[in-house]
Image (cartoon, helix red, strand yellow):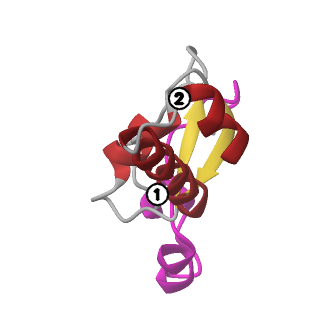
Amino acid sequence: MDDGGKLVGVASLREMLSADGDAPMSEIMQTELVTFSPEADAEQVAADVADLHFPAVPVVNDEGVLVGIVRSETLLDVVEEESSEDMLRMQGMNDESVELLS
């Protein structure tokens, strides 16, 4: 993050551990970021990052300031829950019944 809290790069633990001990983070981190806003639909975020194999994705506000991180396991849980709800709806359950079972 820069002095204003704006996210400028990310690095995995593997990248940090395998880097030269004297290397600055600016040389280790990836600066082409995949980020999402706090208002992003979780199911869409899961679909967008499914093929990227990221352990987590940063959540930034409109100014690019880091406001959180969503782990891939959490996104998988969202996809599983949404799939289960879709299956119940295809079996003829109404939204109220689906919500009770979720």
Residue at 64% in and 27% down? 96
How packed mark 1 is, by other alpha carbons closer than 10 Å (few <14, some 14-19, many 20 or more), is some
Q: Percent from the top left, x then y, of residue 27?
A: 43, 60
Position above or below: 69 against 6: below
Residue 79 horizontal/vertical position (percent): 47, 51
Viewer-side residue, 44 vs 93: 93
Q: Is residue 7 magenta?
A: yes
| Residue in the picture at 57% in, 63% down | 73
Magenta span of residues: 3-28
Residue extending farthest to the left is 51
Residue bearing mark 2: 94
Does the stretch in magenta take in 91?
A: no
Query: Which mark, residue 38?
Result: none
* Tag in front: 2 or 1: 2
Q: Is residue 2 visible?
A: no
Q: Considering the numbered disc 2 on the image, is that residue within a helix, a strand or a loop? A: loop
What residue is drawn where x is 50% and y is 81%? 20
The quarter holding residue 33 reads top left
Q: In which quarter of the image is the N terminus?
A: top right
Front residue of this view, candidates 10 and 96: 96
The residue tagged with tag 1: helix, strand or loop? loop
Q: Is residue 99 rendered to the left or right of residue 47?
A: right
In this picture, residue 5 sits left or right of residue 29: right
Q: Which numbered disc flags the more N-terminal residue, 2 or 1?
A: 1
Q: In this view, does 74 lie to the left or right of 40?
A: right
Q: What residue type is labelled 2?
A: Asn
As drawn, the label of residue 29 is 1
* Magenta stretch prevailing secondary structure: loop
Q: Nearer the viewer, residue 89 or 25?
A: 89
User: Against 63, is 65 above or below?
Assistant: below
